[in-house]
Image (tube, grey):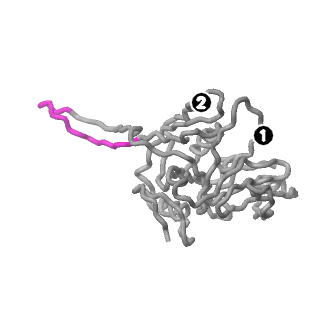
Amino acid sequence: MIVSPFTPLFFISRKADGIDSEYVQTFATSDQILLQVICNGDEYVDARVIDEETGDVLYQILFNSWQMNEETWLKFTTIALSPGIYSVDIAGIGKSEPFRVTDDERLLKDTTLIQYSMKNNRQRNDAVFFIDRMQYFFDFRVPGGFKDSNWAFSVDNEQFVTPFADIAQLYGLESTQKRFTLGCNVGVPVWFGEMLNRILVCSHVYFDGVKYTRKESNVPEMTVQLEGVNSFVFTQTLQQSVNLNPVLEQSNQAIIRRTGGYQNYRIMEDNNLRLLI
């Protein structure tokens, strides 16, 4: 039995030197925490949500089941919680790191919602992105965003010089690269950087509703905030996807925005906080 590494919760079971990071993972109340457990068909997944402030078990998690192959089953569910601090405890795997769910705009305004999915189920065997022909996106909210000072511009073009030394443009295609900063003033644990690197192997990755792709083989670069403290800031070079398939993009946007609820916290392209009704 394993928890899919694409699940946006961290089940960490290791020892490390140094002081733990102070950062508590944060989700908005509108985020949908997709939990996937891959197991044998006869295994029962015993999982529960814990209130970290009281230590009480809030409820037992009920999973949906989907058969991956003859021997392997996917147990999956979407967790939606009211404001508070929680953890998820899975028997045989352990307890997740505590995470906060909030609707406080002051806490959410400096975060970015990363949503990601694959184009099919053949890319990985440790996660499922299409269940009964329905596509699923994972939600992963992180502190950080794009700084205007970290933009870079490039062009792929071909030119012709006339006999009179004039330059004629044969074709040109511009692109914009941006460096995404993951981390706040206190930094984040190292597994946030590992998760970002994993997410960027996906076919469809959206940062606050805008599609980006890893630039070549660029990986997250780590900056140590304070020596002896296991808290870091990561930067990653990305390129915004501009020339998109309109039919596919419309379908993806409908899935990731999930506007069926009364109030959904989303940050749109114009960088304004909006309530989608």
The residue lying at 55 percent from left, 53 percent from top is: 107
The residue lying at 54 percent from left, 65 percent from top is: 264
Can see residue 125? no
Q: Position of residue 149 (x, y in %)?
A: 39, 38
Three-letter amino acid code of the residue under disc 1: Ser
Q: Is residue 13 magenta?
A: no
Give the residue pinned by disc 2. 226
The residue lying at 80 percent from left, 63 percent from top is: 60
Residue toward you, 194 or 118: 194
Q: Which mark is residue 269?
A: none
The residue lying furthest to the right in this view is 42
For disc 1, the neighbor class at 10 Å (few under 14, some 14 to 19, many from 20) is: few
Q: Would you identify the image quadrant in which residue 268 lies?
A: bottom left
The residue lying at 70 percent from left, 46 percent from top is: 10
Q: Is residue 237 left or right of residue 70?
A: left
Q: Kindly report the distance in space between the C-alpha atoms of the residues bearing marks 2 and 1.
A: 23 Å
Q: Is residue 157 left or right of residue 63?
A: left
The residue lying furthest to the front in this view is 54
Three-letter amino acid code of the residue under disc 2: Leu
Q: Position of residue 238 (x, y in %)?
A: 47, 41
**Secondary element type, mark 1:** loop
The residue lying furthest to the top in this view is 227
Residue toward you, 79 or 253: 79
First along the sequence among labels 2 and 1: 1
Main secondary structure type of the part rendered in magenta:
strand
Q: Position of residue 123 (x, y in %)?
A: 64, 47
Give the residue pinned by disc 1. 13
In the rendered image, the vertical position of residue 134 relative to residue 153, given as above or below: below
Region rendered in magenta: 161-176
Q: Position of residue 249 (x, y in %)?
A: 48, 59
In the rendered image, the vertical position of residue 45 relative to residue 219, given as above or below: below
Can see residue 153? yes
